[in-house]
Amino acid sequence: MVRQPSINAQNRAPLTTERITEAALRIVDGQGLGRLTMRRLGDALEVEAMAIYHHLPRGKEQLLDGLVAHVAAAPADTSASGRWQDVLRAWAGDYRDRLLAHAGVLPLVVTRRNPAALTATLASLREVLRRGGVAEDAAAVAAHTLLGYVIGHAALEVRGTAEDGAAARTAAGDGDVDWGARFRAGLDVVLGGVR
């Protein structure tokens, strides 16, 4: 079936990698990762699926890498002033929120080999630590540990896992895990171990 150009085609933004990634993210956020197909993406963009390959020659593999880069490569704000612990707490909270907002991409963040997506984030975290007086070797380990903690916690949170019996519960005492309190408590442990 050949798709006829619509009247809206003239008013539509040109097809770009960014526009493709954003549309794919909307599909994953709304319908789940399993529903992301090139055909469904083409339909969402009102283009033939083959048009996407002009921007993503490696196809779906490149698209998945792009989703990881878009969601997971949020660099730390190294220009923020204040104690390094406070800067990293703010970054960790924002990063967790970003991962939870795009929970459908989280399995890709955990499993795909896309080091470029996290390199800038790790470099920014190391810079915050170095500016705070942490030695280079310790800053590298702490940055890696912090990034792993935030991603891992978000993954457990999305999965809804609370088998460890930890006492972080809602103020109402309804038995639901207070993931925010648990996250902040664990973050204190991670940052408290940085020397």
Image (cartoon, rainbow, N blue to C red):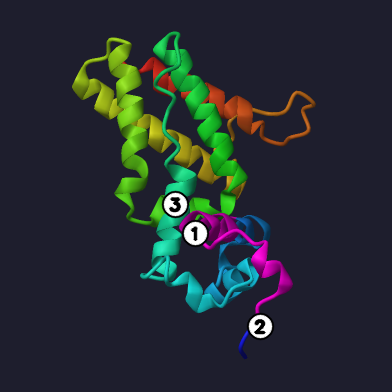
Q: Quadrant of residue 174 in the image?
A: top right
Please provide percent x and percent y for residue 113.
32, 55
Please provide percent x and percent y for residue 20.
53, 61
Q: Which mark is residue 171?
A: none
> What residue is shown at x 33% (from left), y 36% (from top)?
120
Question: Outermost residue toward the bottom?
Answer: 1
Q: Which residue is mark 3?
A: 68
Q: Secondary structure at mark 2?
A: loop
- Name the residue nearer the viewer: 143 or 176: 143
- Which label sits in the foreground, 2 or 3? 2
Distance between mark 1 and mark 2 Cα atoms: 20 Å
Q: Secondary structure at mark 1?
A: loop
Taking 1 as reference, is 172 above or below it? above
Q: Which mark is residue 16?
A: 1
Q: Which residues are magenta?
A: 4-25
Q: Quadrant of the N terminus?
A: bottom right
**Residue type pointed to by label 1:** Thr
